[in-house]
């Protein structure tokens, strides 16, 4: 029996551009830190090795600092072996980071690149069959091809691949899609025993064999991922396979639509933001729609300012239909102005209702609201 | 705000001065200069603004000169709900004391007192109004804008009934400040916004640049993949072409061997042909030698025949030469004799011709001698006779003049009827019978016939001049006759004719000489005659008698001609003979030459024949004719065989198609070389790209791109926010500005009305003003005449300045609000009538406010009916 960690899509060096400089640095650092978490898990679980199935790096052109820090983290986990597979983000082309001088100079002995040139014996009786990406746009099912000519063997075979499985994206006609049927046929015929896949950031058990898995990304990368932040610990022997999910990710992406109208709605939004744990490692997005008064808008603005400072990232955007600011009578009284100022306020309120100038008039009202409340 | 009491102590030149002021109405403070009148408002300012510890020059300047005391100001005032007494002393023992009297009693000192007053004033006093309502002595005349919070609030309230608040003005200020953060005064975006935009664009460019660099890496990586595929193909190509070239090269070598064989057979065939040709040509030479011998033999036979035939002809030629030579000699003798006779005949003819010429020359010589004599004679005459045609003409003219003069003068002709002697003017004149004596009467003439009569003929009065003319004519005639050497005109005519004859003779003599001399001189002519004479004489002496000399020239000429013809005939005869002789000689020479040639030819032919015979014999001694014939037959057989072998080999070579093979071989070699070159270029490019990618891959471009994108998005977001804020600020500002303007338009009405109310008191009922939105008077209309304020006189301007302040104060001051109007000795420019009216206006306004007038001219404000007057004593 063999036990190993199946991971993928580390995408080291990734940092969403919409984050602040400070948050980007932390986000990037977290993806490196997670290597230590994986190593600790592997050691704790007495795993024999770790396979990282593609997109180890965000790109072949990430900064040297990220590369050497990541290698250093793996070196620190020695003798635990890391097998790294080039994926679509870091293909094994002429610009490959795995062939860069820095990589070659600093790669520790416990780190191996699965370049697909030959099968690798990870531990005795366990053979790794790799399907690395040779470039960014392959025109064939690389994983299928890697398994095609394999003959039955006594060893346990772990196929390390990267890419979309046709069963999950059936509508796509990409020739590089991995054929699940083909893999299952090879599994059924006993030629391969486990398929460790990367590319999909959500942890996914593909098909019905229980032997084809996406580990998901150990740290999330975007809002649309269903269950990121995991690695898999795989127990494999002739009789079967056991796959266990282990959470290692520290960052979260939270996304929610909000229909605002009453103060209660704004309270709910505030509660949602407020109740979030580890806000500094949370990237939140609120899509707002509905209609608010000038005072509510001012409150919203104030809230957003506050939580923007608290969260790793906070984006408040107009949802479908947008958020309209419509001054009500209470608003107008709330401004506490009289004479010509009151007349001007009425003008702006009217402009804010509709027309080309509505948005700018709403902004002007918000500004006026702020000015009327600014300390002297 | 109201002032109740002001006191100055040790302030400039003022030792102690206190003034009480009524809370409402007008207080005129009168006093001479230097009693502290103007110091009152100044002291008030110091008190309200400078702390007692202040070292400000304004404080220093009020220090009394030469006294060790501190200047001190105390005021009692009320503002808003507060009434307090406030005192400060600076410089010496500084002190601040505040005593608030109401609404709640407070007593404070020092900084606390100062700050408390500041607080009270901030709360209750419109400081802008406080400054606006003062007219300071000596300050430049101006019409301030009354855009001060109190007036605006008051007017707003009057206009709308609402309580216009300080907050509204504060809000407007904030709106303006917000607007000004983004927009310039001219409505353009501020520089920092533009700079922000530039930053966004720069960041965007940076992102594009990095994107391009990343794309470039992608392209290079793709190219590397292509190059790798190319490399595989090129290696295969190179190997394939190398293989092809190798195979073709082997075939080419085989072909080369066939070609060498062909070359050898070509040489062998050529050798066989050459040998055959050699024997063939030897045989031909042998035939030629035999033919040569035959030819020589024939030639010799023919020459021998010719020699036999040519001997009689030579003898005939010799005979012919002898005959013609004899004939020629005879002809020559005859010719010589004829020529001798011809010479004699010619000499005879010349002899006669010389004799005739001597005669002619002698005649010419004689004529010349005669002509020379005539010439001499003529020249003698010409020398002696001077009368030529010209002189003769002059003499004839003079004679005619004399005749005419004499005809003009009266004359007396005395004709004797018998011989008689008469006396004319005392001169005896003897006349025969019938003879007439002509006497000219140019003066009285006395004609005395002795014993008979005495006749006196008197000349007339004109006779004198006529007599003079006659004399002059006579004198001229005489002079000319004397010049000509003649006595009178008749003699002159004769002389002239003589001269003409001599001239003719001269010309004729010269003509004769010229004609007869021709081209000779006289001596030459004479010499020629002598020479010819000698020759004639010599010929006559030398000539033999026979034949006799012809009688004359004609005969001699005829003889000479006859002899000449004889000579011509003899010469023709001789020439014929000569020709015949030469021809005969030539024929003989030719015959002899032919003979000689023939002999030579025979000799040569004989030798040639012998040589040919020797050559043939020699050749045959080496190889007989039959040997040659058999060798030739063998050689021809050999050559045919060699040619056959060659043709076979050439056919083999041709079948191998060496040209095509060569082309294919070269093509295969070139293709292999090109594949090799391409492979090398491919590898070079791979190396270049490998290096490029290796270097670029280390630059962390993706991370830098992410960072640059983050930076760009951040800047872009900031810029969008700024622009949105700028837009909002502008909309807010513009909306407020418009509404504010509208409101100003509305509420400036009461202010305008109040000013016009006061102004009509001062000017007349037609007085009106225009006010801008800053509540500043911009023009004044009087009697329909509108002037801008800058066109107004100093007096009118000063009056408007006072009126506008009074109007403002009147509006804001009821109920203790506003501030006092302080007028420091204004209206100096106003005339008494206007001053009087101003007094009424000030009085009217002061019903609603506190007015304090400081003056050193007591009468100036005497027209203000309800004023309280405080007189400051001198030396206070």
Image (spheres, rainbow, N blue to C red):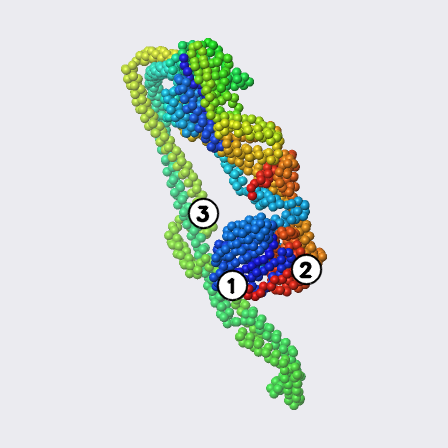
Q: Nearer the viewer, residue A32 or A270?
A: A270
Q: Earlier in the sequence, mark 3 or mark 2?
A: 3
User: Residue B223, how many percent across, how many down?
Assistant: 45, 25
Quadrant the C terminus of chain B occupies: bottom right
Residue B532 quadrant: bottom left
User: Residue B382, how many percent across, how many down?
Assistant: 51, 69
User: Residue B181, how many percent across, how many down?
Assistant: 55, 42
Q: Is residue B824 above or below residue A313?
A: below
| Chain assignment, label 3 | B
- Name the residue carrying label 1: B508
User: Residue A321, how many percent across, how many down?
Assistant: 61, 29
Q: Nearer the viewer, residue B31 or B277?
A: B31
Residue A39 quadrant: top left
| Residue B438 appears anywhere in the view | no
Q: Earlier in the sequence, mark 3 or mark 1?
A: 1
Q: Choose mark 1 or mark 2, whichever is in front.
A: 2
- Name the residue carrying label 2: B840
Q: Residues within 10 Å of mark 3 (few under 14, many from 20)?
A: some
Answer left or right for A355 relative to A213. right
For mark 2, give the secondary structure.
helix
- Name the residue carrying label 3: B559
Residue at image location 50% in from the left, 33% down from the top: A309
Q: Choose mark 3 or mark 2, whichever is in front.
A: 2
């Amino acid at each position: 029996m063999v036990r190993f960690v199946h991971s993928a899509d580390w995408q080291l060096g990734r940092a969403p551009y919409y984050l602040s400089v400070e948050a980007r640095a932390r986000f990037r650092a977290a993806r490196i830190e997670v290597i230590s978490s994986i190593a600790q898990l592997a050691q704790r679980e007495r795993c024999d090795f770790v396979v990282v199935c593609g997109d180890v790096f965000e790109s072949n052109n990430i900064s040297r600092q990220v590369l050497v820090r990541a290698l250093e983290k793996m070196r620190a986990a020695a003798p635990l072996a890391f097998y790294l597979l080039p994926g679509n983000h870091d293909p094994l082309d002429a610009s490959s980071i795995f062939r860069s001088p820095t990589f070659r100079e600093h790669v520790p002995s416990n780190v191996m690149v699965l370049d697909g040139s030959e099968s690798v014996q990870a531990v005795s009786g366990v053979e790794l069959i790799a399907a690395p990406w040779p470039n960014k746009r392959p025109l064939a099912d690389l994983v299928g091809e890697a398994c095609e000519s394999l003959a039955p063997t006594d060893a346990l075979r772990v196929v390390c691949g990267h890419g979309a499985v046709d069963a999950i994206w059936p509508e796509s006609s990409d020739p590089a899609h991995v054929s699940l049927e083909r893999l299952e046929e090879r599994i059924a015929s006993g030629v391969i025993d486990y398929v460790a896949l990367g590319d999909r950031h959500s942890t996914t058990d593909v098909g019905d064999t229980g032997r084809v898995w996406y580990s998901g990304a150990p740290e999330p990368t975007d809002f649309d991922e269903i269950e990121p932040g995991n690695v898999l610990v795989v127990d494999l022997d002739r009789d079967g396979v056991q796959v266990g999910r282990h959470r290692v990710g520290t960052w979260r992406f939270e996304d929610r639509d909000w229909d605002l109208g009453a103060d209660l709605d704004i309270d709910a939004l505030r509660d949602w933001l407020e109740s979030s744990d580890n806000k500094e490692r949370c990237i939140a997005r609120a899509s707002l729609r509905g209609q608010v008064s000038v005072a509510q808008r001012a409150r919203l603005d104030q809230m957003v300012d506050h939580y923007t400072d608290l969260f790793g990232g906070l984006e408040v955007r107009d949802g479908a239909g947008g958020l309209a600011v419509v001054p009500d009578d209470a608003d107008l009284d709330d401004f506490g102005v009289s004479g010509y100022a009151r007349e001007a306020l009425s003008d702006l309120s009217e402009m804010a209702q509709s027309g080309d100038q509505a948005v700018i008039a709403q902004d002007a009202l918000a500004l006026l609201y702020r000015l009327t409340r600014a300390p002297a | 705000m109201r002032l109740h009491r002001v006191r100055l102590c040790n302030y400039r030149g003022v030792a102690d001065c206190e003034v009480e002021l009524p809370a409402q109405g007008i207080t005129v403070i009168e006093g001479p200069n230097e009693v502290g009148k103007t110091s009152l408002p100044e002291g008030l300012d110091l008190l309200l603004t400078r702390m007692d510890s202040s070292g400000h020059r304004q404080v220093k300047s009020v220090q009394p000169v030469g006294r060790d005391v501190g200047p001190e100001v105390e005021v009692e005032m009320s503002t808003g709900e507060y009434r307090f007494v406030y005192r400060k002393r600076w410089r010496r023992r500084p002190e601040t004391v505040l005593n608030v009297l109401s609404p709640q009693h407070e007593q404070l000192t020092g900084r606390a007192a100062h700050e408390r007053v500041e607080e009270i004033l901030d709360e209750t006093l419109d400081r802008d109004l406080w400054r606006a309502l003062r007219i300071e002595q000596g300050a430049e005349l101006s019409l301030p804008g009354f855009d001060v919070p109190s007036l605006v609030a008051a007017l707003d309230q009057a206009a709308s009934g609402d309580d216009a608040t300080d907050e509204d003005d504060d809000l407007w200020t904030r709106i303006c400040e917000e607007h000004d953060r983004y927009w310039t005064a001219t409505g353009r975006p501020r520089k920092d916004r533009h700079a922000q935009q530039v930053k966004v664009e720069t960041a965007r460019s940076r992102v594009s640049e990095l994107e391009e660099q990343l794309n470039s890496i992608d392209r290079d990586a793709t190219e590397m993949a292509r190059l790798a595929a190319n490399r595989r193909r090129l290696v295969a190509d190179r190997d394939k072409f190398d293989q092809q070239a190798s195979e073709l090269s082997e075939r080419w070598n085989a072909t080369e061997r066939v070609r060498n064989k062909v070359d050898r057979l070509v040489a062998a065939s050529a050798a066989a042909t050459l040998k055959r040709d050699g024997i063939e040509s030897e045989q031909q030479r042998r035939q030629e030698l035999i033919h040569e011998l035959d030819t020589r033999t024939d030639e010799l036979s023919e020459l021998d025949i010719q020699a036999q035939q040519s001997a009689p002809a030579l003898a005939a030629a010799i005979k012919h030469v002898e005959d013609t030579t004899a004939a020629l000699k005879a002809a020559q003798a005859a010719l010589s004799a004829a020529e001798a006779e011809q010479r004699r005949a010619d000499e005879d003819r010349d002899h006669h011709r010389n004799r005739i010429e001597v005669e002619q020359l002698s005649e010419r010589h004689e004529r010349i001698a005669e002509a020379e004599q005539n010439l001499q004679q003529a020249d003698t005459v010409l020398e002696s006779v001077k009368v030529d045609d010209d002189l003769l003409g002059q003499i004839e003219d003079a004679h005619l003049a004399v005749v005419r003069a004499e005809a003009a003068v009266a004359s007396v002709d005395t004709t004797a009827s018998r011989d008689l002697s008469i006396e004319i003017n005392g001169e005896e004149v003897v006349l025969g019978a019938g003879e007439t004596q002509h006497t000219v009467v140019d003066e009285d003439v006395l004609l005395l016939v002795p014993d008979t009569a005495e006749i006196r003929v008197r000349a007339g009065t004109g006779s004198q001049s006529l007599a003079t003319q006659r004399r002059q004519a006579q004198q001229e005639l005489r002079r000319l006759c004397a010049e000509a050497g003649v006595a009178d005109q008749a003699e002159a005519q004769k002389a002239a004719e003589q001269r003409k004859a001599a001239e003719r003779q001269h010309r004729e003599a010269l003509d004769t000489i010229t004609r007869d001399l021709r081209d000779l001189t006289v001596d030459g002519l004479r010499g020629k005659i002598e020479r010819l004479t000698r020759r004639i004489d010599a010929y006559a002496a030398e000539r033999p008698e026979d034949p006799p000399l012809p009688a004359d020239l004609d005969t001699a000429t005829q003889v000479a001609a006859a002899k000449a013809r004889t000579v011509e005939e003899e010469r023709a005869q001789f020439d014929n003979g000569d020709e015949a002789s030469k021809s005969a000689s030539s024929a003989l020479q030719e015959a002899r030459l032919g003979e000689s040639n023939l002999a030579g030819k025979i000799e040569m032919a004989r030798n040639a024949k012998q040589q040919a015979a020797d050559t043939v014999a020699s050749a045959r001694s080496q190889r007989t004719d039959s040997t040659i014939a058999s060798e030739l037959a063998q050689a021809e057989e050999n050559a045919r065989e060699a040619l056959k072998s060659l043709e076979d080999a050439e056919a083999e070579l041709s079948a191998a198609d060496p040209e095509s093979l060569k082309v294919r071989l070269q093509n295969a070699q070139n293709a292999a070389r090109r594949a090799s070159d391409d492979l090398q270029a491919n590898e070079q490019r791979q190396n270049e790209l490998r290096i490029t990618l290796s270097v670029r891959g280390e630059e962390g471009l993706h991370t830098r791109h992410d960072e640059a994108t983050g930076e760009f998005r951040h800047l872009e977001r900031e810029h969008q926010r700024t622009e949105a804020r700028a837009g909002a600020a502008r909309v807010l500002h513009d909306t407020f500005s418009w509404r504010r303007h509208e409101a100003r338009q509305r509420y400036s009405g009461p202010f305008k009305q109040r000013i016009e109310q006061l102004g009509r008191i001062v000017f007349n009922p037609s007085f009106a003003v225009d006010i801008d939105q800053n509540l500043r008077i911009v023009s004044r209309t009087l009697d329909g005449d509108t002037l801008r304020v800058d066109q107004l006189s100093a007096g009118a301007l000063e009056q408007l300045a006072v009126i506008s302040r009074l109007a403002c104060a009147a509006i804001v001051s009821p109920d203790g609000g506003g501030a006092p109007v302080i007028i420091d000795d204004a209206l100096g420019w106003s005339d008494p009538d206007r001053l009087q009216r101003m007094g009424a206006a000030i009085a009217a306004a002061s019903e609603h406010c506190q007015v304090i007038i400081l003056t050193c001219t007591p009468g100036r404000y005497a027209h203000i009916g309800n004023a309280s007057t405080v007189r400051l004593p001198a030396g206070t």
